[in-house]
Amino acid sequence: MTRRGWTLLIAATLLVAAIAYQNRMERAALSLGPVAFYAAPLVILLLAAFLLGMAAMLLISLPADRRTRELLREHGLLNAAPPAPRPADDTASAPSSERGIHPSADHSANDCRSHSV
């Protein structure tokens, strides 16, 4: 992590600690249907709400994440699953020497070197 990242992390931690310290005596009532909490610490309620929001976003984003991973696998951009086996082609899988091609003559189409003096 860079120095800027550490500075931002420390600043955010100090800000959260300052807010928690200033609200340490604040109490709130929370009603969850049949269950009600009276005089619950506000800091604990905020932390719980934050964590529940993170969990909800994780659960909501799972289907989209699965679709994205499947598309990436289909296009060969994610190596999590092995590619589907291709039909065996005897001439393509044989080394160039067995196919009657001299190794020095096996050049690609993109090899455009000029041999000028």
Image (tube, rainbow, N blue to C red):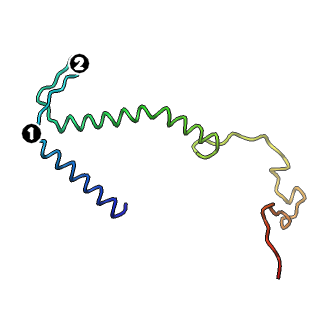
Q: Which residue is mark 1?
A: 25
Q: Give the left or right position of residue 5, taking residue 64 as reference.
A: left
Whole-percent x, y for residue 91 in the image: 85, 49
Seen in the picture, residue 85 relative to 92 is either above or below; the reply is above
The quarter in which the N terminus is drawn is bottom left
Whole-percent x, y for residue 65 in the image: 50, 37
Report which quarter residue 49 is drawn in.
top left
Report which quarter residue 45 is drawn in.
top left
Marks 1 and 2, how far apart in space? 25 Å
Q: Give the left or right position of residue 61, taking residue 72 as reference.
A: left
Marks 1 and 2 in Cβ contact (< 8 Å): no
Q: Which residue is mark 2?
A: 33
Whole-percent x, y for residue 86 in the image: 75, 41
Question: Residue at position x 18%, y 26% from top?
Answer: 30
Whole-percent x, y for residue 101 in the image: 88, 60
Residue found at the very far top of the displayed protein = 34
Circle 1 Cα neighbour tier, 10 Å, few/some/many (<14 / 14–19 / ≥20): few
Q: Give the left or right position of residue 56, taking residue 63 as reference.
A: left
